[in-house]
Image (cartoon, grey):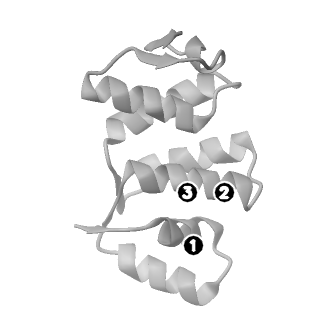
Amino acid sequence: MRAVDTNVLVRLLVRYDPEQVDAAETFVARGAWTSLLVLMETVWVLESVYGLSRRQIGIVIGMLVEHDRITLQHEDAVRRAHAAFERHPSVGFSDCLIVEAARKAGHIPVGTFDKVLSRLDGTHRL
């Protein structure tokens, strides 16, 4: 299966350049794989460059999880991270994904100095 980078995923989501959107849609039409790193970068770009709100980020992640042509690396961990993100309004998606990726790999608890992150199950505040 083909893979996409952050630029392609952002073009599909933001849709600001019609030619690039068409090229991205054509590329993913037969299916495309998205790594956790690309997903995290995409969330960062959507928040910092495009100013998407927390609610909008949650919607985007939900759309990607359910997309019929995009396959997310460790989709089960992304789903759990999305659920945690929705339950904990003060915790960012990247922190939720860090915990769920560690859980999937069998490396819990995640040690942290972050008071907010330490609210998540599977963390240990140092």
Q: Position of residue 33 (x, y in %)?
A: 32, 60
* Residue type, label 3: Thr
Find numbered disc 2 in the image and state the secondary structure of the residue it sits on: helix
Q: Earlier in the sequence, mark 3 or mark 1?
A: 1
Q: Amino acid at mark 2?
A: Leu
Q: Is residue 104 left or right of residue 21?
A: left
The circle drawn on residue 11 is: 1
Query: Reading the chain from its start, which is encountered first: label 2 or label 1?
Result: 1
Residue 126 screen position, x and y as percent? 53, 9
The image quadrant of residue 28 is bottom left
Q: Is residue 72 depicted above or below 30 in this figure? A: above
Determine the residue located farthest toward the left in the rendered image: 1
Identity of the residue drawn at 40% across and 48% down: 36
Mark 3 neighbour class, 10 Å CA radius: few under 14, some 14 to 19, many 20 or more:
many
Q: Amino acid at mark 1?
A: Arg
**Residue at the disc numbered 2:** 46
The residue pinned by badge 3 equals 42
Q: CA distance from mark 2 to mark 1?
A: 11 Å
Q: Quadrant of residue 55?
A: top right
Camera-nearest residue between 103 and 84: 103
In this rendering, which labeled residue sits more in front, label 3 or label 1?
3
Is residue 96 toward the left or the right of residue 107 in the image?
Answer: right
Numbered disc 3: secondary structure: helix
Q: Is residue 66 visible?
A: no
- Packing grade of label 2 (10 A; few <14, some 14-19, many >=20) is some
Q: Name the residue at 54% across, 46% down.
A: 61
